[in-house]
């Protein structure tokens, strides 16, 4: 659970930097960097091409395999970084954003860093060294966040966000290579490289489609509106994503290797899937629905009144994210059992519908876009569950525990909304504080009422964590305080 604490600390640091920087920067700065990082994210997926997953899933990984995967990923990242640098002026002209050119040139360095750290990251995940990975991610987030805060306060504007990305990535890369003993050899197997890329091609298609889904609205908004409009959308959704990632990252980081080890045992796979989804829901459902209930007060209180318009966007996006919990681990299951074709077809349909909704709704305003995407999420969730059941055999009953947790969170959010309606004060921090207190008191009881097994498991886990920490603390004290010498 040190891993969980470190990941949550990392997310808390990101949130703190987001709040401080958000108070200093204009919406156009967030929109510009969101557009650039979206482009970088797509190219980073291509540079990996499923090589990391190939290394994680392979039963035996020898020296030639490791070196081949490393040089393939690094070579792809270098080629893509060069192509991006050459095409940066064209992209800037296409979006009518001349300021995009230097931002893309500097952020193209992040592609090189991604290519360099892909394999050591995969090796550590393969060895289940999640504690070490989380520690390095926390350190990288800390350094990047401090850099962004200092730069923003110094008036660096958009470059504070660029510096946050690059400094954080560089720190993570250096620490990753210090953590692994392996170093690349000058060996390369063309046959194995083709085998890796053939495996990764299916995964790459899915990853690119997922990026099209996740980044589609950013590219469309930047194209039909402006960087300022994209900035409002980015800030309105980023708070939701920070909370969402905090709740899911701990479980998601161990899901792929865990599911891969039990891929031939469907009952165990089903139980693991059910447990992972219920555990994520126990954290994310109440967080998302609390945001949905309070974001019109919370967002302007945190970021300033200039961002008040984004509160309603965050409100709807939070509900969308809550529904998305039911689809968190579908892809992980498909990858673990090697059923990539159903996932590819499924994601293709979802992405097409997603982009169609974005194109049709974006011109009607950001709130209309958020509502349309909520409807799209609610409509596609049952389809994913049907495909997962038919392709893998995961029973529908695995949804019941998560549904009960969601019911507890929905009732909690309803109570919070009722309390906010009764409050007579307009002071935002008071309204947020009262809402948080009410949610903290009523949610545990509602979880016991509607999802007692999940609540019991959570309580047992907390007690075990506390017991282990006390045991370690006692052992450490015994070692650090030696007995007094006898005269």
Image: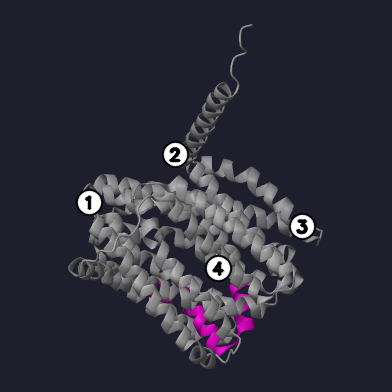
Secondary structure of the residue carrying tag 3 is helix
User: Which of these two is toward me, 207 or 179?
Assistant: 179
Which numbered disc flags the more N-terminal residue, 1 or 4? 1
Q: Nearer the viewer, mark 2 or mark 3?
A: 3
Which numbered disc flags the more N-terminal residue, 1 or 3? 1
Relative to 133, residue 194 above or below: below
Secondary structure of the residue carrying tag 4 is helix
Q: Looking at the picture, how far across and down is residue 361, in whole percent?
A: 52, 83
Which numbered disc flags the more N-terminal residue, 2 or 3? 3
Relative to 370, residue 295 above or below: above
Instruction: Kindly report the distance in space between the C-alpha atoms of the residues bearing marks 1 and 3.
Output: 53 Å
For label 4, the residue is 166
**Disc 1 packing (10 Å; few <14; some 14–19; many ≥20):** few
Which numbered disc flags the more N-terminal residue, 2 or 1? 1
The reply to whether callout 2 and callout 4 are in contact (CB within 8 Å) is: no
Q: Nearer the viewer, mark 1 or mark 3?
A: 1
The residue furthest left is 191
For label 2, the residue is 453
Instruction: Kindly report the distance in space between the C-alpha atoms of the residues bearing marks 1 and 4.
Output: 34 Å
Q: Is residue 273 visible?
A: yes
Q: Find the magenta span and give its range.
A: 207-235
For label 1, the residue is 59
Quadrant of residue 294 within the rendered picture: bottom right
Q: Residue at x 61, y 7 (%)?
A: 486
Quadrant of residue 306 within the rendered picture: bottom right
**Disc 2 packing (10 Å; few <14; some 14–19; many ≥20):** few
Instruction: Kindly report the distance in space between the C-alpha atoms of the residues bearing marks 4 and 3.
Output: 34 Å
Q: Is residue 191 left or right of residue 216?
A: left
Instruction: Kindly report the distance in space between the C-alpha atoms of the residues bearing marks 2 and 3.
Output: 35 Å
For label 3, the residue is 429
């Amino acid at each position: 659970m040190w891993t969980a604490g470190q990941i949550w600390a990392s997310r808390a640091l990101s949130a703190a930097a987001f709040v401080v920087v958000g108070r200093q920067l204009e919406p156009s700065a967030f929109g510009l960097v969101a557009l650039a990082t979206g482009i970088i994210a797509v190219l980073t997926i291509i540079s990996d091409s499923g090589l990391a997953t190939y290394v994680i899933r392979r039963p035996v990984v020898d020296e030639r395999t490791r070196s081949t995967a490393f040089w393939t990923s690094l070579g792809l990242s270098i080629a893509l970084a060069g192509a991006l640098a050459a095409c940066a002026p064209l992209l800037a002209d296409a979006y009518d954003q001349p300021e995009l050119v230097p931002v893309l040139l500097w952020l193209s360095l992040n592609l090189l860093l991604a290519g360099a750290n892909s394999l050591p990251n995969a090796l550590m995940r393969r060895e289940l060294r999640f504690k070490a990975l989380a520690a390095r991610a926390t350190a990288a987030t800390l350094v990047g966040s401090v850099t962004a805060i200092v730069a923003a306060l110094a008036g660096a504007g958009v470059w504070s966000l660029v510096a946050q990305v690059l400094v954080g990535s560089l720190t993570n890369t250096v620490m990753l290579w210090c953590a692994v003993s392996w170093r690349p050899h000058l060996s390369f197997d063309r046959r194995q490289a083709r085998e890796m890329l053939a495996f990764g091609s299916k995964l790459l298609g899915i990853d690119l489609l997922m990026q099209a889904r996740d980044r589609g609205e950013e590219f469309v908004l930047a194209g039909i509106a402006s960087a300022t409009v994209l900035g409002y959308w980015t800030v309105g959704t980023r708070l939701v994503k920070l909370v969402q990632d905090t709740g899911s990252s701990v479980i998601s980081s161990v899901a792929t290797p865990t599911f891969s080890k039990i891929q031939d045992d469907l009952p165990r796979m089903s139980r693991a899937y059910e447990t992972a989804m219920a555990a994520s829901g126990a954290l994310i459902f109440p967080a998302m629905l609390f945001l949905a209930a309070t974001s019109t007060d919370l967002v302007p209180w945190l970021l300033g009144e200039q961002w008040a318009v984004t509160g309603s966007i965050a409100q709807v996006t939070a509900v969308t994210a809550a529904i998305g919990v039911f689809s968190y681990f579908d892809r992980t299951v498909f990858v673990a059992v090697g059923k990539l074709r159903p996932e590819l077809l499924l994601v293709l349909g979802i992405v097409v519908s997603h982009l169609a909704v974005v194109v049709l709704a974006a011109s009607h305003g950001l709130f209309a876009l958020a509502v349309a995407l909520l409807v799209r999420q609610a409509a596609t969730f049952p389809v994913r569950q049907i495909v997962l059941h038919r392709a893998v055999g995961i029973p529908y009953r695995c949804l019941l525990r998560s549904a009960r947790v969601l019911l507890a969170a929905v009732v909690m959010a309803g109570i919070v909304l009722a309390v906010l309606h009764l409050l007579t004060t307009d002071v935002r921090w008071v309204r947020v504080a009262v809402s948080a207190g009410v949610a903290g008191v009523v949610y545990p009881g509602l979880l016991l009422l509607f999802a007692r097994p999940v609540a019991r498991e959570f309580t047992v886990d907390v007690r075990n964590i506390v017991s282990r920490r006390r045991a370690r603390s006692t052992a450490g004290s015994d070692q650090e305080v030696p007995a007094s010498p006898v005269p």
